[in-house]
Amino acid sequence: MNYCNVGQFPIHNRIILFARPQAQDFLAARMTTREMKAGETISEAGAPFTHLIFPHEGVISLMSRTSGGRLVEEASIGREGFVGFPLIMGGKTAINNTVVQVSGYASWLAISDLDEAMGLYECIRKIMLSYAQSLIIQLMQSIACVSLHSAEQRISRLLLHAHDRVTGTQFHVTQETLADALGLRRATVSEICNELARRRIISYSRGSLTIVDRQGLELCACDCYRHIHAASFLARTDADNQF
């Protein structure tokens, strides 16, 4: 697998890294890369698309508003994918609120540059369509997860997904963010995080969470984590590369 940088930021996004070297160079030359902070709203539902976003580190949540006005996560995106799925299916506007769940950094690519890239490099379109399939699987599995699994299983699944998308075992995520993402009461999240910490599966202090026992956390999570991960680009190896 090829690795390159955008300025001082190393490229970890799998969509870009699975492209052929010439396509990678084209994208790297056209992208703008910056840090993103937890809680930052990147776009709102109904806003016109101007860019695709390729996370390299951290997690972005696609949030929908309930009838009561609360935002709840429908899917999350990290280094395995990109934000802007409706665009490649012919859509012109965002259908979700897009909020940073875990801090990191990402690259922005203008739609005009995307159109040019897909015209020049067939691999770009193939990769994006392949990722779109995995995102649909995540959406379907997440719907089932809400109705079938306990709060501890769902929190454990979310923490595993976050861990997959960062470097190292530590990342910043607040209990309020977890509660909002999963549609749970903050008191419920606090109780479960305290229990996971008591069992030495995680440690948590002032929003800084460390995965202490990854295997133990996987045992706490529902099977939805394994199904979503297996369909994700994160599960692909160099042998699957390139498109």
Image: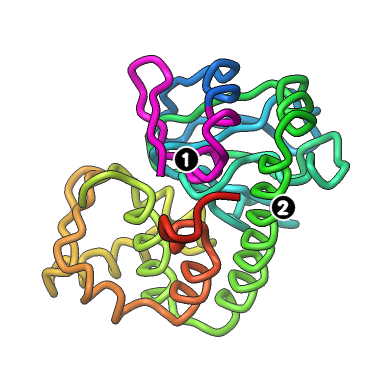
Range of residues picked out in magenta: 1-24
Number of callouts: 2
Disc assigned to residue 13 = 1
Determine whether, in the image, residue 8 is placed left or right of residue 56: left
Q: What amino acid is labelled 1 in the image?
A: Asn
Indicate the secondary structure of the residue bearing disc 1: loop
Image coordinates of residue 67 in percent, x first then y, are 75, 57
Where 186 sits versus 118, above or below?
A: below
- Whether residue 6 is in magenta: the answer is yes
**Residue drawn where x is 36% and y is 23% of the image:** 9
The quarter of the image holding the N terminus is: top left
Look at 41% across and 60% down and name the residue there.
237
**x, y (%) of residue 133?**
69, 62
Q: Which mark is residue 129?
A: 2
Say which of 116 and 46 sits in front: 116
Viewer-proximal residue among 70 and 26: 26
Q: In this view, does 216 lie above or below 169?
A: below
Report the residue at 22% width, 74% height from top.
215
Asked if residue 109 is positioned above or below residue 192 in the image, the reply reads: above
Task: Residue 78 in the image: state x and y as whole percent.
Answer: 48, 46
Q: 10 Å neighbourhood of mark 1: few (<14), some, or many (≥20)?
A: many
Give the amino acid at mark 2: Leu
Residue 140 vs 150, above or below: the answer is above
Q: What element carries label 2?
A: helix
How much space separates mark 2 and mark 1, taking CA atoms?
A: 16 Å
The residue at 64%/49% (across/down) is 127
**Residue 47 part of the magenta segment:** no
Answer with mark 2 or mark 1, whichever residue precedes in sequence. 1
